[in-house]
Structure formats: C-alpha cells, structure tokens
Image: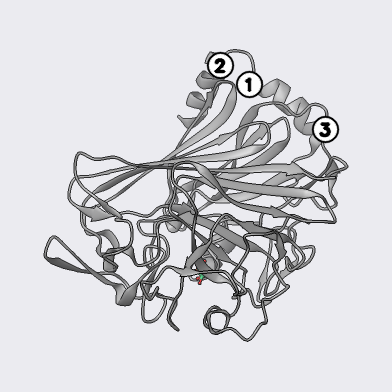
Amino acid sequence: MINRSVRSRFAGLAGRICVAVALAASMAVAGTAASAAPARTMPATMKPNITRDLFGTLADGTKVWRYTLTNRGIRVKIITYGGIVQTIEVPDRRGHMANVALGFATLDDYVAKNNPGPYFGALIGRYANRIAKGTFTLDGVTYHLPINNDPNSLHGGTDGFDKKVWTPTPGSNNGDPTLRLDYTSVDGEMGYPGTLRSTATYTITDDSIRIDYRATTDKATVVNLTNHSYFNLAGEGTSDIYGHLMQLNARRYTPVDSTLIPTGQLAPVAGTPLDFTKPTAIGARIRNNFEQLVFGLGYDHNWVVDGSGFRPAARVSEPTSGRVLTISSDQPGIQFYSGNFLDGTLYGTSGHQYRQGDGFALETQHFPDSPNQANFPSTVLRPGDTYRTSTVYSFSTAH
Ligand code: GLA
C-alpha cells in the first residue's frame, strides 16, 4: 500500500523528482552505504529524489521503513521508528561527502540503545527536555509523568515519541523531497492529558533539512517537540567535536540545578564558559571550573535565543573539512549538549566507538521545565489552537 502511494506520488510530481529508474542509476553512482566511510565525492547526478527500503521489523511485526531523501547537495536517511534521522551526507569544501550525523546501523540497536540512551536523531515528544520531578499542574489538575532521568521526566518519558512508529507520507514541495510523519498520542499516554495529533514534515532542499512540526489536542496539554540529532561535521565516528567552532545567537541562558532543572533565572553568558556569542571552540573552556559545567558534565544547557520570530540560533564550523552548519528556528530556546554521556559503550553507524564529546546536539525548543516555571514562555496547547514550529539545518562550506 505504501509502495503504491510512493509510486503515485512520484507519478504526479512535476519533473524535478526522478522516477525510480533514474534513482537506481544515480544511486549506482553514489552508492547507498549509510556509513559514507570512506567519504565519497558528491556525484554530479545528485538531484531531488526519494526512495525507501525496509529498515527492519519490530518484535510485534511492525515494519520500519527507511526513506532516503536526496537533493543536489545533501542526502538524508530517515526511519519511521522515532522519525529518526539516521544519516546526513553532505560535502566538505572539496566536495567529499561524509555522514555528519551520529546514529546506529540497525533497527535493533535503535530499539535497544537509543532510549534510555542518547536519542540519536529522534523526534522528541510530547515534551522535549526535563520536567521537574515528573509532575506539573495545569488548570488545577496535577499530572504525573514517568521518572526516567532521576528525579525528573526527560524527553516525554520512558516511551516517548522517539520510540513510536510514525505514519509516513512521502511527497514533494516545489520539487524538493518531503516526508510527512504522523503520530497520534492518546489521552493519558506517558501521563500527559489530551489526545495529541502530531506531525513532523521533513523537507530536503538543496543543502538543508527543514522540519515543520504541527500538533493539535482535544484537551489542554503541554507540548515541546524537537529533533535530537547529533552532529560531527568532520564525519561521524572520526573524532571528537571539541575543535568545532560554536556560535550561539544568545546572550542569556537558563542556569540549572544539579539535576539539570532550570532555576528560573535568565542569566547573562558574558564572562562565563557559556558565552558563545563569538565563534569559540567547543573544547576551549569545557573543563573550566564553573559549577554549571560540573552539573552538566560539560555543556548541557538551554540558551535563550536573542530576538523573536524565525531567526538563526546557532552556527557551527569545523575547520578541517570546512563544513558549516547553521540552525534557524522560531523557538525561544536551544539546548546545546556536548555529548557528555557518550561513554564508549556504543558503536555507531560505521562501526566506530562513540566516546564522550564525539558529537553535539542542538535542540531547538521551549525552555526546559516550562510547565513548572511561570516566568518562562508557555508550552500549553489548548483545543482549537495549533502548535506550529519550524527548524532549518543548513549545510555549507567555508574556505
Ligand atoms: C538531552 C539532555 C541530556 C541527555 C541527552 C540524551 O540533550 O539534556 O542531558 O539526556 O538528551 O542523552
């Protein structure tokens, strides 16, 4: 059934998306190896395209599909389990392609090791980041969520959106390949009120990944959706990320207590190792004697993005490859996590060991624990309203 819908969508596209035959030809040149190791040169044949393969089957028999979305300068693999971005292949300054996203090679690894674990590439919901002590009160009713990051609830609980199989609808937008993913979370799931119909649509443009999130509810609830991709712009599994230059468009951050719950303050970054207002190596100050870095074992904080509306939040560059990642969104915050809990026990997509600091995550989001923090922007969604947010990850090179 899905096969038929993929074909009929292709048939209806106005020319820029190739049919499967052309796809097979271009893939023969480009190769389909998810690991992209060794790096390959960007093939001249790369053009907007989408295909899928069977990634695996869950214990209950549910099939998990992997979609490969290609555009002129980027190839992205997304699986229906967790809406996970498995790989992102982009060129370096010489045109050599490498996979810059951390992930796993198999569905079994994602099921067994991603949650609890790093949440590589996953869509996170219903509430990204932490809710203090797994409880909040809304309209006079107190709700209890699973405590999966003692003593708090993290990333939607033990069985969050990252563990759900989303319903895929491939398509195109002005010739760019898209993958719409739908998931309905029932009233009371993971302790949250209201049936939440949520959609994340991935659009792959020439050099970017765009994610548009939408959600509606039938009862007041809280929502904070994001994607938990980890990046290493030198190539997944090649090195740590401490030499990457990070710039955050943020003069303030939300300091946390020892359990990584915000204290409620919006504190200036000036004069602290959290000041990334100018491009600074991630590793330059990560071991400074600064209490916030002790709490996070490194960077694991929410920055308050300057300004409002859709705007750049972060720019990261990797000097050796020349690859640059720019992240823009309409969200008030961005969590920068420097892969502190990677401890060498996981082996990634290309079979390489992941150690502390081998990847970084930048999660566009509302502030952590907003449901319990009256002075933070609200994450309440009510019936009749639509939750909407968009994030764009743009890849380029600097010379
Ligand atoms: C988020 C959290 C981190 C960690 C990772 C997943 O970024 O803030 O503390 O839990 O997810 O490992």
Please say if 308 is above or below 264.
above
**Quarter assignment of residue 158:** bottom left
In the rendered image, the quadrant that contains the C terminus is top right
Label 1 near ligand 1 (CB < 8 Å) = no
Q: Specify which label sits upstream in the sequence, 1 or 3.
A: 1
Q: Measured from the top left, where is residue 61 in percent x and y? A: 45, 51
Within 10 Å of disc 3 (Cα), the crowding (few <14, some 14-19, many 20+) is some
* Left or right: where 281 falls relative to 190: right
Mark identifier at residue 178: none
Q: Mark 2 sits on what residue?
A: 13
Q: Residue at x 69, y 39 (%)?
A: 75
Q: Measured from the top left, where is residue 369 in percent x and y? A: 35, 67
Badge 2 amino acid: Leu
Q: Measured from the top left, where is residue 177 in percent x and y? A: 58, 29
* Left or right: where 33 falls relative to 360: right
Badge 3 amino acid: Pro
Q: Measured from the top left, where is residue 32 in percent x and y? A: 74, 41
User: Farthest residue toward the right?
Assistant: 94
Please say if 263 is above or below 54.
below
Badge 1 amino acid: Ile
In the rendered image, the quadrant that contains the N terminus is top left
Asked if the residues shown at circle 1 and circle 3 are in contact, with their CB atoms under 8 angstroms apart, the answer is no
Q: Mark 3 sits on what residue?
A: 43
Q: CA distance from mark 2 to mark 1?
A: 6 Å
Mark identifier at residue 17: 1
Between residues 128 and 5, which one lies in front from this camera angle? Answer: 128
